[in-house]
Amino acid sequence: LGVVFQNQNKFNDAADMFKKSIALKPYYAEAYNNLGVALHHLGNLNEAKQAYKKSITLKPNQAQVLNNMGLTLHDQGKMNEGLISFNKAISLKPNYAEAYCNKGLTLKSLGKLDDSISAFNKSILINPNNSEAYNNMAVVLKTQGNLYEAIKAFEKAILLKPNYVEAYRNLGVAFNDIGMLEKAIKVFNKAIMLKPDNAESHMNLSFTLLCN
C-alpha cells in the first residue's frame, strides 16, 4: 500500500505505511529504502539518508539504494559523498543508466564538465531513450558555449519525450542565445501550452518578445 501511495505522490501517507511495515518487520531492507524515497520527497533529507543507511546495513550491495543515497547527498550539497555513492552503485550494476545520469549531474555541480558529459554519454549508451540524460548533457554543453551541440541534444530529448517542458524551455533559451528569436518564441509557446502555470516559461517568452 505504501508503494501505491508513493506512486500517487502521497508521500506522507507512503512514509506512514512504510514505518508501519518496519514496525511489523524490523529487518525489511526494502521498506527502509522505500521510506527513504518518501522522506526525500518530503524534504526530510537527513531522515532519508538514515533510512538508506539502515537498508544497506540490513542488505549490503544494493545498487538502487546507493543511487537513492547519492541523490539525497547531492540535494544536501554533499557532492563528493554523492559521487562516491553513485560510483558504488555503478560498480555493482555497470549498466545502471540512471546512476550514470545522476553521476553526470553531480559532476556538473562539482564543475567537472567534461567528466559530466562523459557520464551522460555513458547513460545514453546504455539507454538510448534517456531523455533526461540528453537534456542534462545539453545544459552542460550550453554552459561550455557549445550552443549548436546543445540545441541538437535538447531537440533529441524532446523527440524522446514530447511533453518535456524543461527541455522546451532550455531549447528556447539556447535559440535566444544564438539570436534565433522566432524559434525561441515558438518553443516557449509550446512549453506554456504544455504547462500553462509555469512562470519561468512565461518570463522567458516575455523577455524574448522584448528583444524581438
Image: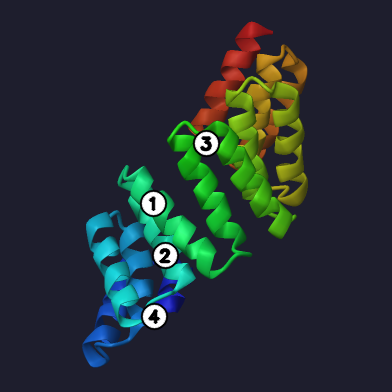
Residue 82 marker? 1
The kind of residue on which mark 4 rests is: Glu
Disc 2 or 1, which lies upstream in sequence?
A: 2
Residue 12, given in percent of the width and then of the height, sits at 30, 67
Disc 4 secondary structure class: helix
Q: CA distance from mark 2 to mark 1?
A: 9 Å
- Give left or right: position of 123 versus 39: right
Front tag of 4 and 2: 2
Q: Hey, which quadrant is residue 135 in on the image?
A: top right
The residue identified by callout 4 is 30
Q: Are marks 4 and 2 in contact (CB under 8 Å)?
A: no
Could you tell me which residue is drawn at 64 percent across and 19 percent down?
Answer: 145
Report the front residue among 190 and 146: 146
- Could you say which disc has been placed on residue 198 in the image? 3
Which comes sooner in the sequence, label 2 or label 3? 2
The scheme the figure's colours follow is rainbow
Q: Residue furthest bottom?
A: 24
Q: Secondary structure at mark 3?
A: loop
Q: Residue at x 43, y 35 (%)?
A: 110
How far is disc 4 from disc 1 in space, using C-alphas? 21 Å
Which circle's residue, 3 or 4, is located before the other in the chain? 4
